[in-house]
Image (spheres, rainbow, N blue to C red):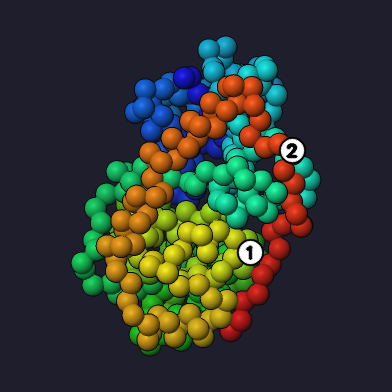
Amino acid sequence: MNVLIYHDSVIPAFRYGGTQRVIWSLGKELVRLGHKVTFLCRKGSECDFARVLHIDPSLRIEEQIPDDIDVVHFNGEVFPCKGKPYIVTYHGNFMSGKLDRNAVFVSANHAARYESRSFVYNGLDWSEYGKVCLSERKTYWHFLGKAAWSVKNVRGAIDVVRRIPKARLYVLGGYRFNFKMGLRFTLTPKARFCGMIGGEEKLEILRHSAGLIFPVIWDEPFGLAMTESLYFGAPVFGTPYGSLPEIVTSDVGFLTDNASEMADRIIHGPEFNPAVCHEYAADKFNSQVMAHEYLKKYETVLSGQCLNAVEPQAVRPDARKLPWHK
């Protein structure tokens, strides 16, 4: 099978780039399985295992799809594609409107909120993540996400850490001075803001973290921050919204919408087993599992069927803010 994967970004991801990491891992795994892969991404993209075409803004996307492609995999948005079979993975939340009948969502909850059952969990190529330190002493906690987005609730994470004696929080993906949110700044000696870091610097912080504090206040579609943290043996302490209840089982984390309850569970609750967290993420959220699930979707549209009986649409205005209690 010859698959074209489209995303309006530069690959590989150098820093945050959640979707870029997912499609990179998917492409690599498809090649391992004997398929051909072509990426259609922004100028500056490069790849050593697949053909790369750079998006030409002066041409329609349809004109940039080679004739030898069997199926097109759009990510985030969909375009006409010469009548070729296609799917589109939606990675985010949408306020309203109908989506494509060949839509794929990234968790069961994400799909259900658009009256769909079509989803594939995000997986990653864990071989790219280097060593894992499961037996070493963990000395701090971390928050991972775009802290400029208020729904990610970095302030909530800081609220929790303030209640834990001698705890420190590393904020990956945000800055103390946040100009995007009206010159907001956060003053606390318990939080270290690391900015939009990636690569080995990010992985080294995850290796030595006691856990992810992830008190999101929206319906999280998936949350790569959770699976990456679990892979390094770090349990997840989050809110019961969106995909979290289906991804964070009682063996690998704790969910509550209350800062005091979360802090109390961290201080007084039994510790989670880092090896269980690691094995869970490694087995369930890897690129092999993801690729096989997407191959099923490709086969469906290649046979002339749609992935959804009707056009998915939000059952309510999405991207709403949800409660967080201090």
Element type where label 1 sits in the image: loop
Q: Which residue is mark 1?
A: 218
Task: Answer above or below: position of 187 versus 57.
Answer: below
Residue drawn 59% across the image and 61% down it:
242
* Residue 142 can be seen in this image: no
Q: Residue furthest right?
A: 97
Label 2 crowd (10 A; few <14 / some 14-19 / many >=20): some
- Label 1 amino acid? Trp
Residue under label 2, please give it: 310
Q: Quadrant of the C terminus?
A: bottom right
- When the figure is inspected, residue 218 is found, relative to residue 99, above or below; the finding is below
Residue at the (75%, 46%) spot, across then down: 313
**Residue 58 or residue 64, whichever sits in front:** 64
Q: Which numbered disc, 1 or 2, marks the residue that appears first in the sequence? A: 1
User: For the residues marked 1 and 2, what is the alpha-carbon distance in whole angstroms?
Assistant: 26 Å
- Horizontal and vertical percent position of residue 174: 51, 63
Q: In the shown orientation, is residue 74 left or right of residue 321?
A: left
Q: Amino acid at mark 2?
A: Val
Task: Spot the residue most to the left.
Answer: 135
Task: Tell which tag, 1 or 2, sits nearer the viewer.
Answer: 2
Q: Quadrant of residue 154?
A: bottom right
172 or 186: nearer the eye? 172
In the rendering, which numbered label is found on residue 313?
none
Percent x, y of residue 227: 42, 56
Q: Where is 86 relative to 278, above or below?
A: above
Q: Please give left or right for residue 230 compared with residue 245 in the image.
A: left
Secondary structure category for the residue under label 2: loop
Q: Give how far across and how far down residue 35 sits, in percent.
A: 41, 22
